[in-house]
Image (tube, rainbow, N blue to C red):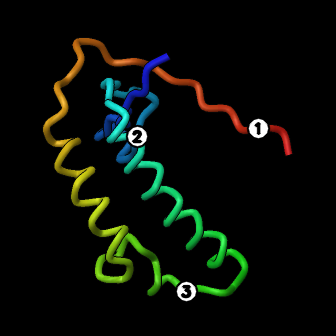
Amino acid sequence: GRSHYFASQFDHNADEGSEIFKLTPVGPEFMQRARRNWVIFRTWERKYRAGEADLQSHPGRGGVDAKYDELKAWLDDQIARLPALLALLRTEIRGKPG
């Protein structure tokens, strides 16, 4: 019942992300800002998939969307300060039907 930040642990042998994640509890302000950042990205993604935006307008490029940049900087700072949990967790990611 508590929100968590999770980060995939890079698999250097496979040269990609892995199914092992670090899981860290986060507070309501973190989640609120993360959701707002996600909404900005998803809005761009819908436009991109509809052919209404190009990769140059991706908010993650920096300097494209001031609010996205502000939120990302705050989130990145908070993530750098998160205490590590003692355990790593293995995930199974499944797609939703349709």
Q: Residue at x 37, y 50 (%)?
A: 33
Contact, CB < 8 Å: mark 2 with mark 3?
no
Q: In which image quadrant can residue 60 be found?
A: bottom left
Viewer-closest of 63 and 95: 63
Q: Does residue 72 sit above or below 13 in this rendering?
A: below
Q: Looking at the rendered structure, which numbered label has been put on residue 54?
A: 3
Q: Residue at x 53, y 59 (%)?
A: 39
Q: CA distance from mark 3 to mark 1?
A: 27 Å
- Residue holding disc 1: 96
Contact, CB < 8 Å: mark 3 with mark 1?
no
The three-letter code of the residue at mark 2 reads Met
Q: Looking at the rendered structure, which numbered label has been put on residue 31?
A: 2
How far from the left and from the top, in percent, is residue 76?
Answer: 23, 51
Quick one: which residue is furthest to the right in this view?
98
Mark toward the start of the polypeptide (2 vs 3): 2
Q: In which image quadrant can residue 5 be found?
A: top left
Q: CA distance from mark 2 to mark 3?
A: 28 Å
Q: Does residue 49 sit above or below 71 in this rendering?
A: below
The three-letter code of the residue at mark 3 reads Asp
Q: Secondary structure at mark 3?
A: loop
